[in-house]
Amino acid sequence: MINTTLCYIERDDQYLMLHRIKKHNDLNEGKWIGVGGKFEEGETPEECLLREVKEETGLTLTEYRLRAVITFLSDRWETEYMYLFTAGGYTGTMTDCEEGVLEWVPKERVPELELWEGDRIFLKKLMEDAPFFTLKVVYEGDVLADSTLMEYGQNRTNDV
């Protein structure tokens, strides 16, 4: 299993989106996603987030929030646990990304983009400013076969 981060940086009711069109043999090829990547040995989710955002955008985050943990299961790829963040503050100047093209996209236009079906679920929750949640998505090939969403309010407890 792998651990990753993904961040949707916000500015003026827009998200900074990465159109994955530059990297060869990319499982996200052609898709629009946030910025992020795989943990390095010994990193926390926050350390990975800050490093990946800096590497992919040139920006240094100054304000960010953990919004969800997403579990990806697939019949093709390794299980992935993704820590999903949004960020509202940053410094620096945006640079080119080796993995694709960065573009500020109005939030209302994001659903029109070529997205993974599971991403549509969590992006909707982000746009609703939902409380912390977990989401499990199961893919068969490129097709979303199943999903389970669990939202947590301030007083949520385990109901096992």
Image (tube, rainbow, N blue to C red):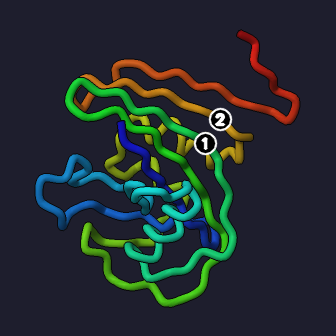
Residue 124 vs residue 26, the one in the foreground: 26
The residue at the far front in this view is 42
Q: Quadrant of residue 140?
A: top left
Q: Is residue 143 above or below residue 119?
A: above
Element type at marker 1?
strand
User: Which amino acid type is marked by label 2?
Assistant: Phe
Q: Residue at x 85, y 35 (%)?
A: 154
Residue holding disc 2? 133
Q: Which mark is residue 68?
A: 1
Is residue 112 rendered to the left or right of residue 9? left
Residue 129 vs residue 112, the one in the foreground: 129
Q: Earlier in the sequence, mark 2 or mark 1?
A: 1
Q: Position of residue 67 (x, y in %)?
A: 64, 47
The quadrant the C terminus occupies is: top right
- Asked whether the beta carbons under mark 2 and mark 1 sit within 8 Å of each other, the answer is yes
Q: Is residue 106 above or below residue 108?
A: below
Q: Which mark is residue 41?
A: none
Q: Residue at x 59, y 85 (%)?
A: 91
Q: Is residue 135 above or below residue 59?
A: above
Is residue 13 rendered to the left or right of residue 8? right
The residue at the far bottom in this view is 93
CA–CA distance between discs 2 and 1? 5 Å
User: Which amino acid type is marked by label 1?
Assistant: Ala
Q: Residue at x 26, y 50 (%)?
A: 28
Q: Position of residue 155 (x, y in %)?
A: 87, 29
Q: Position of residue 35 (x, y in %)?
A: 43, 62
